[in-house]
Amino acid sequence: MKEVLEPLSHVAGVRLAALILADGVPVLAPGQARGMANLRGAGNGFAELEAAAGLCVGWMAELSRSVAPLSWDAPERAVLRAARGSLVLRRVGDVVLLVVVEAGLAPEELRLPIEAAAARLGRVLRDLSQPQTALPATSTSSAPAGVSKVMSNQRVSNGSPAARETGN
């Protein structure tokens, strides 16, 4: 998952990029817990991220439940704007991509990097869900496959009744 979060976390204006699993457990890129501590000046950034992750998953679930009676699909993107920055949530399957954006930047300006990270995440999840293919079976014979087939054909032709009559 590091290959999904690292490029997004280096974009100017992104304070925090994290992945949240369906049960609210955050998955971080290296150094991101330190970034969460700087958001409010607290010492325990990971505990705050765990709380924020639970709130974000609950918020996305509540949004899904509220639009379900309208026969709409579950929302894939949600934005919460505040005075100190914005919170962008992007759902990819059962995983939520959480991005905290600085105050002077509009979340729409980061839509392309966020969508690129979502596409990378989708590819990673698709690759993880595909079953592993087995290696092709190898022949135990030391001779190449074509040689053993030719040799077996000669044995059959030499042992046939027609070959015995001609004297071969």
Image (cartoon, grey):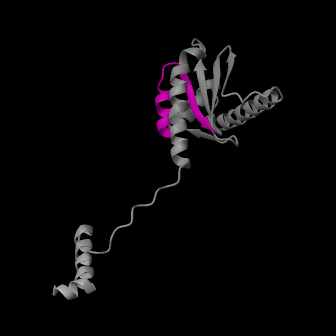
Residue 78, placed above or below residue 23: above
Residue 128 colored in magenta in the image: no
> Residue 82 occupies which quadrant of the picture?
top right
Q: Give the range drawn in magenta.
A: 1-20
Residue 137 located left or right of residue 33 = left
Front position in the image: 28 or 116: 116
State the residue at coordinates (59%, 20%): 101
Q: Which of 83 and 133 is in front in this view?
A: 133
User: Which image quadrant for residue 111?
Assistant: top right
The image quadrant of residue 71 is top right
Q: How many marks?
A: 0
Q: In terms of depth relative to the viewer, which is nearer, 28 or 130?
A: 130
Query: Where, quadrant-wise, is the C terminus in this rendering?
Result: bottom left
Residue located farthest toward the left when viewing the structure as drawn: 167
Residue 4 is a magenta residue: yes
From this viewpoint, which residue is outermost toward the top?
104
**Would you place residue 126 above or below residue 11 in this image?**
below
Q: Point out residue 119 in the picture as x, y percentages from the top left corner.
A: 52, 32
User: Is residue 129 positioned above or below 94 on the image?
Assistant: below
Q: Locate residue 39 relative to residue 142 in the image: left or right.
A: right
Residue 34 lies, in percent from the top left, at 55, 32
* Residue 3 coordinates in the image, percent (x, y): 46, 37
Residue at the far right in the pictured view: 69
Residue 61: x and y, percent?
75, 34
Residue 157 left/right relative to 90: left
Residue name at image x 54 percent, y 43 percent: 126
